[in-house]
Amino acid sequence: MTEQAPAPAAEPGLIRTVAAVIRNARGEILLVRKQASEVFIQPGGKREPGEDSLATLGRELAEELGVRLLPGAKALGEFEDSAANEPGRRVRAEAFLVEVEGEPVPQAEIAELAWVAPRAPFPVAVAPLSAGHIMPAVVAVAP
């Protein structure tokens, strides 16, 4: 794994996360829905102290989906939009195109999985960050 810079200092109202883009053989993207939410997001999460971005993804993917992050993640960029599950807040995610070992299964706070084509219209409610930024970035690099 490559060494990432530590997370910048907190900005009021901003949630900083690391997001995974996992594709299947049909080119669909895996989205997850947390318990008590109706909106689907990229799997991933917040860094713990001293963690780099890929370590965060490895930990979160194991906890949430029961899969192992494989080497070779490709950075897609850093994107920001309205937070889907926290009104009035924004979320900024560092997104990576990744491959995993194992079959994703909802675990921990994840209630449901959905494999969706990376272009709208989506069959489920998709968070603004994913729909407006991360999915288009995936299409741009891997149509």
Image (spheres, rainbow, N blue to C red):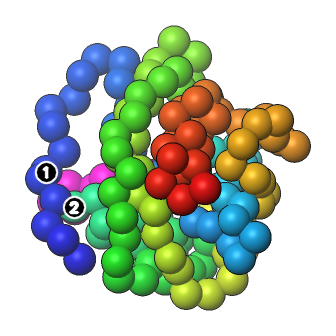
**Residue 87 magenta-drawn?**
no
Per the image, the residue denoted by label 1 is 6
Q: Earlier in the sequence, mark 1 or mark 2?
A: 1
Is disc 1 placed on a helix, strand or loop? loop
Q: Which residue type does callout 1 highlight?
A: Pro
Residue 70, image quadrant = bottom left
> Looking at the magenta stretch, what is its main secondary structure?
loop
**Residue 78 point in image, percent of width and height:** 34, 40
Q: In which quarter of the image is the C terminus?
A: bottom right
Q: Is residue 99 left or right of residue 41?
A: left
Q: Residue lying at the far bottom in this picture: please name it.
A: 102
Q: In which quarter of the image is the N terminus?
A: bottom left
Determine contact: label 1, label 2, CB under 8 Å.
Answer: yes
Q: In this view, does 138 lie to the left or right of 106?
A: left
Mark 1 packing: few (<14 Cα in 10 Å), some, or many (20+)?
few
Please give the name of the residue rendered at 62% of the width and 87% of the height, measured from the top-left corner.
Answer: 102
**Residue 48 magenta-drawn?**
yes
Q: Which residue type does callout 2 highlight?
A: Asp
Frontmost residue, 123 versus 41:
123
The magenta segment: 44-51
Please give the name of the residue rendered at 71% of the width and 37% of the height, measured from the top-left corner.
Answer: 126
Mark 2 packing: few (<14 Cα in 10 Å), some, or many (20+)?
some
**Residue 62 point in image, percent of width and height:** 51, 75
